[in-house]
DNA sequence: GCTACCTATGCAACTCGTTGCACTGCACCT
DNA sequence: AGGTGCAGTGCAACGAGTTGCATAGGTAGC
């Protein structure tokens, strides 16, 4: 998996400029594959040179020109090649775990506060996802094909955040009990 | 959070060589913060130059010499400085989600197989964690301090894998139903 | 005897991701 | 009049992470 493929999936759904893609990543794909505008511009250029995408320059008045990218035949080929290829399982990488593990070397109270803060952060993210679910997929049982897949990805995000929040609660309770 | 801090936590628990640390990362810390031996050697050298750790060269016969690292005062200071510092929330980054989202552009059947494969992988990891839990923390209610923290980190790993497996099951069922 | 893996450290080259900055012009707020 | 924010693209530098390789003796299996 590389950023290339995430961009190809997104561009296949709908053509767009680098800037628009960066916004999209902020709002949807990026919840599962974050990327900055810098990365996106660089990869778009690379893919353009490789012939995976083509761009059309669009002059706008009052705003800078933009390049709208769309997926070319070679890009579609690459995408289906990648889709058929096995993917490495995602690895967990969480600094909070390391911090908790080292908590007794510093202030356990501060680490506890930190975990409460993360809990709040993830709870907020969870609410955002729930909002998307209610707005975009009010009746999930009727979903099929592409929409079903999008819904299921969102479900993954919801489950991940739920389980993170539940873990925080377990940790907070246990640390408080240990503190008394 | 940087690899530096994960290594400092690990070295504080017990001194060791770069090689040993790499093994440790493979077996425990690395479940939550993966690192290769290359990264570890490089960071150890940097920390040595910065005075955060000190090494003692140990000659062995039949085997190459090794450098055993232990945390120095400056390292302990850095560790507690970092522990008191706020940490960015972990971001989800999963290529499988992108693949599922693009499934309809390739073979949905292949993506389904891929998800089944990942499910098996994560189920195996979950069993490993359960094994560690039973071996190292048979009676969690009595845990305090450092051991409690280690247990709670493990609980985080267990919860993450459980929720991943449950998500896979939801996806597999939904895709099968959609296929009929 | 050959292959392969383990212990142990490390270089070199590369890709990926992050951060700070630059330029343009419009819209909005104070 | 001045600051902030949005739209739009991009460079330059750095740090993090990956991959392939080198070295070298010991142990274990075929």
Image (tube, coloured by chain):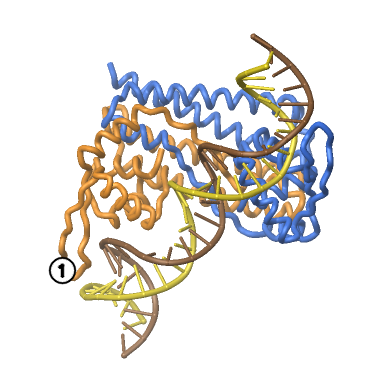
Chain colours: A orange, B blue, C yellow, D brown
Residue in the image at 55% along x and 31% along y: B161
Q: Horizontal placement of A81 versus A114: left or right?
A: left
Q: Disc 1 is attached to a residue of which chain?
A: A
Q: Position of residue B72 (x, y in %)?
A: 80, 56
Q: Is residue B172 visible?
A: yes
| B30 versus C23 height, above or below | above
Q: Position of residue A37 (x, y in %)?
A: 36, 57
| B116 versus A10 height, above or below | above
Q: Position of residue A88 (x, y in %)?
A: 47, 32
Q: Which residue is mark 1?
A: A61
Residue in the image at 71% along x and 54% along y: A109
Q: Horizontal placement of A56 versus D28: left or right?
A: left
Q: Residues within 10 Å of mark 1 (few under 14, many from 20)?
A: few
**Residue placed most toward the observer, B94 or B164:** B94
Q: Horizontal placement of A16 versus C29: left or right?
A: left
**Residue placed most toward the observer, A38 or B60:** B60
Residue in the image at 57% along x and 23% along y: B124
Residue in the image at 34% along x and 50% along y: A43
Secondary structure beneath disc 1?
A: loop
The quarter in which the N terminus of chain A is drawn is top left
């Amino acid at each position: 998996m590389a950023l290339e493929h995430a961009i190809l999936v997104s561009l296949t759904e709908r053509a767009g400029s680098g800037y628009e893609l960066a916004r999209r990543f902020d709002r949807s794909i990026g919840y599962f594959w974050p990327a900055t505008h810098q990365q996106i511009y660089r990869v778009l250029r690379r893919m353009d040179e490789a012939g995976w995408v083509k761009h059309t320059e669009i002059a706008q008045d009052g705003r800078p020109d933009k390049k709208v990218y769309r997926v070319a035949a070679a890009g579609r080929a690459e995408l289906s090649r990648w889709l058929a290829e096995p993917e490495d399982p995602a690895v967990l990488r969480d600094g909070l775990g390391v911090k908790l593990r080292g908590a007794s070397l510093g202030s356990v109270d501060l680490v506890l506060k930190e975990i409460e803060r993360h809990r709040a952060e993830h709870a907020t993210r969870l609410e955002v996802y729930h909002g998307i679910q209610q707005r975009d997929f009010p009746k999930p049982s009727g979903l099929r094909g592409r929409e079903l897949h999008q819904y299921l990805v969102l479900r993954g995000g919801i489950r991940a955040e739920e389980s993170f929040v539940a873990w925080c609660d377990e940790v907070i309770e246990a640390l408080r009990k240990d503190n008394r």
